């Protein structure tokens, strides 16, 4: 809507986890390198945790692009609210296994055959599970068992689990102790530091067609950082709304008053804020990605 006004070719602050807009912060770079290394060297279980909106799904999308380019055979389950039956159905569907999707036994047999065949051909097989904190206990138990499948030398299925910090607490349960012990690699995403928030905003704007942005002043970026707490998803929501407001006011620059209006509309809370408007830290529509 506002793109032409600012000379943008694309929307810079969309809420979709698009790898094309990746800002390679040191920690995102490290997390991605770890995930790629872990899958490639067949480490078994890999875990990525981070607060809501810190970039977990974006990392998985980047990993997926890499795996596809490397001809790794993988299943990507982004909806974790599954029954055991649905879990196996999804694996069967994603890996295109030739068997009765609704029979767990048949899926397991077909999966096992595929794993052995891939291993013989030197091909890696991976299972990626997003929103792992929502997985039911019985599904987690199946995940654990799948992670047990191995040849004499290595794990046959590489399993990447991404979830919010409560997933770590779930892994502390006695029934999951064995899975926890088998996690070969862990990475955590933290919110951005202030300098990173500035680079992040500049990177996204540059990717969308504005290499030298002058819309957001350094002072305003410092304030955006404070109010977003360095969470990428919130930075996107704030910046998108700021661009819209500036456009409506025919201004090529975003101003502090506009930020006041935007953060109040988004009902954001941040440390040092005087009036508490809402018991929630930020509204529900910003908690989950809009895909
Ligand atoms: N390193 C990054 N580079 C570019 N965009 C990012 C980065 N990290 C997060 N984002 C953006 O922030 C938003 C939330 O990211 P997402 O991966 O959905 O977070 P999570 O899965 O942890 O809740 C998305 O719009 C995504 O594009
Ligand atoms: Mg996500």
Image (cartoon, rainbow, N blue to C red):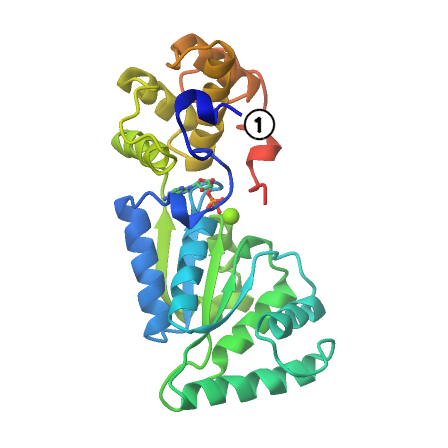
Residue name at image x 30 percent, y 46 percent: 24
Q: Residue 283, image x and y in percent?
A: 59, 29
Give x and y (percent) for residue 181. Answer: 41, 69
From the viewer's perspective, tell me whether residue 178 is left or right of residue 190.
right
- x%, y% of residue 75? 53, 68
Q: Quadrant of the C terminus?
A: top right
What residue appears at the point 39 percent right and 15 percent down from the top-left corner?
A: 254
What percent of the width, then of the height, locates residue 41? Answer: 32, 74
Q: Residue at x 44, y 25 (%)?
A: 239
Q: Is mark 1 within 8 Å of ligand 1?
A: no
* Residue 215 drawn above or below residue 74: above
Label 1 Cα crowd, 10 Å radius (few <14 / some 14-19 / many 20+): few
Q: Quadrant of residue 153?
A: bottom left
Nearest to the observer: residue 120 or residue 68: 68
| Nearer to me, 167 or 67 | 67
In the displayed structure, would residue 287 be above or below residue 105? above
Indicate left or right for 45 with 194 as reference.
right
Image quadrant in which you'd find residue 22: top left
Residue at image location 42% in from the left, 27% down from the top: 228
Q: Is 200 rendered above or below residue 134?
A: above
Mark 1 lies on a secondary structure that is loop
Residue indicated by mark 1: 280
Q: Is residue 92 left or right of residue 119?
A: right
Give the tally of numbered discs.
1
């Amino acid at each position: 809507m506002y793109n032409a006004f600012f000379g943008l070719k694309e929307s810079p602050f969309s809420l979709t986890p698009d790898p094309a807009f990746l800002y390679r912060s040191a920690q995102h770079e490290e997390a991605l390198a770890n995930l790629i290394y872990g899958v490639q060297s067949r480490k078994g279980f890999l875990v990525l945790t981070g607060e809501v909106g810190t970039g977990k799904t974006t990392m998985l999308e980047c990993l997926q692009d890499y795996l596809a380019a490397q001809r790794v055979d993988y299943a990507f389950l982004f909806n974790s609210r599954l029954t055991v039956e649905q879990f196996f159905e999804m694996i069967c569907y994603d890996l295109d296994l030739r068997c009765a999707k609704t029979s767990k036994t048949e899926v397991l047999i077909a999966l096992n055959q595929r794993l052995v065949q891939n291993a013989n051909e030197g091909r890696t097989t991976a299972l990626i599970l997003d929103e792992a904190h929502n997985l039911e206990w019985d599904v987690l138990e199946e995940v654990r068992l799948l992670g047990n499948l191995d040849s004499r030398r290595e794990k046959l299925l590489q399993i990447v689990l991404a979830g919010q910090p409560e997933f770590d607490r779930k892994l502390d349960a006695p029934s999951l102790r064995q899975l926890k012990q088998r996690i070969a690699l862990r990475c955590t995403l933290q919110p951005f530091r202030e300098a990173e928030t500035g680079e992040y905003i500049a990177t996204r704007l540059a990717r969308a067609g504005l290499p030298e942005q002058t819309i957001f002043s350094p002072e305003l970026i410092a304030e955006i950082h404070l109010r977003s707490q360095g969470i990428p998803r919130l930075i996107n929501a704030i910046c998108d709304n700021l661009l819209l407001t500036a456009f409506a006011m025919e201004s090529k620059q975003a101003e502090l008053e506009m930020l006041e209006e935007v953060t109040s509309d988004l009902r954001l809370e941040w440390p040092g804020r005087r009036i508490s408007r809402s018991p929630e830290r930020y509204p529900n529509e910003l908690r989950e990605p809009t895909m």
